[in-house]
Image (cartoon, rainbow, N blue to C red):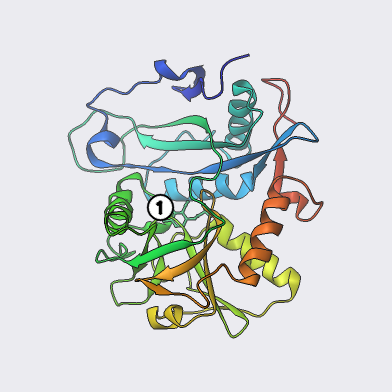
Amino acid sequence: MSEPGDVAYFGGEFLPLDQARLPITTHAFNYGTGCFEGIRAYWNREQERLYVTRLREHALRILRSARILRLEPDPALTVERFSELVLELLARNGFEQDAYVRPIIYKAGHTIKVTLSGIPAELCMYAIPMGDYLDIHKGLRLATSSWRRIDDIAIPARAKPTGAYLNAALAADEARQQGCDEALMLTADGHVAEASSANLFAVIDGTLVTPPVSDDLLVGVTRDSVIAMARERGWPLEVRQLDRSEVLAADEAFLCGTGVQIAPVVEIDRRPLGDGHPGPITSELQGWYLRVVRGEVPDFAAWRSAVPTTAGATS
Ligand code: PMP
């Protein structure tokens, strides 16, 4: 069996990661003309199974992103085919731990021309072992970014374009330089959009509030999971425009995303949020979410795709 992360998908085949290399003339390297996904898989020790979280939704999103960005991948790359490839990549890597898959659809042509149509696109993927990349229990400190979230009329942020993550990197880096964990990003007209690479919810008077998809945010798969879980519990929920001052005065706030999972926010711009500790609704959602994705509870079974134990065979 190969070492975790040793197998990549590149040029239409599975091969050793160190052989997956691009020439510097590649269009996507020059202009950021690609889109990507981040997909998590959770290892259930008792069942000895690896479960991919919401694979179908990630497949739908990357294909939709490719359409928005005119990336034009092979039409044979359907939701089903993409999902099979992700499962096979994980199976071939033989992970027995939590892992993360990074698929990228990118313009693989070698023209210097700044355009999209007619340049061939390819899919590549790699996978890495990944536990919590931020401490999701102690609570995060956010800083409002001086960088505004990219407006949909500049770069369609909902398409998860590789190039647009310069905006996210500038914001996240600035927040870390200021001693905080993450950036709170506002839209060009000053409303709350999201964090640099996660969506945001506030809990205000017992109601979960999150900004609408038209406020320049990535339509997060985890955001959708949180909405479904809140509905299941019967908790009041509003999807509406949100001002920064409302978040400053909220009882609780949390970030959600594939990478960050569900992470409480305890401070914004050096002000404690609520009582400065992770709130009860956030903690309840976080615990439930982690049990769901790991397959420790039967709830939301459709969100979990089991990785086949024999490489090559997909179930
Ligand atoms: N917003 C941005 C900008 C992101 O990069 C991500 C991570 N993909 C998210 C939100 C969360 O999305 P998801 O829950 O689909 O991972």
Decide: is 112 above or below 54. Answer: above
The residue shown at (48%, 44%) is 37
Give percent across and percent down for residue 44: 73, 38
Residue 153 higher or lower than 159, as above or below: below
Q: Is residue 79 rendered to the left or right of residue 174?
A: right
Which residue was labeled with disc 1? 68
Specify whether 26 is left or right of 193: left
In the figure, 140 relative to 48: above or below? below
**Is 145 situated above or below 247?**
above
Compare residues 217 and 253 and report the one nearer the observer: 253
Q: Farthest left residue?
A: 112
Q: Position of residue 6 (x, y in %)?
A: 51, 20
Question: Mark 1: which amino acid?
Answer: Ile
Front in this rendered view, residue 298 or 164: 298
Quarter of the image for residue 35 reads top left
Residue sitting at 29 percent across and 52 percent down? 173
Crowd band around label 1 with a 10 angstrom C-alpha radius: few (<14), some (14–19), many (20+): some
Q: Give the image quarter of residue 11.
A: top left
Q: Position of residue 80 (x, y in %)?
A: 63, 38
- Left/right placement of residue 247 relative to residue 164 reads right
Q: Label 1's element?
A: helix
Image point 52% across, 24% down: which residue?
5
Quadrant position of residue 153: bottom left
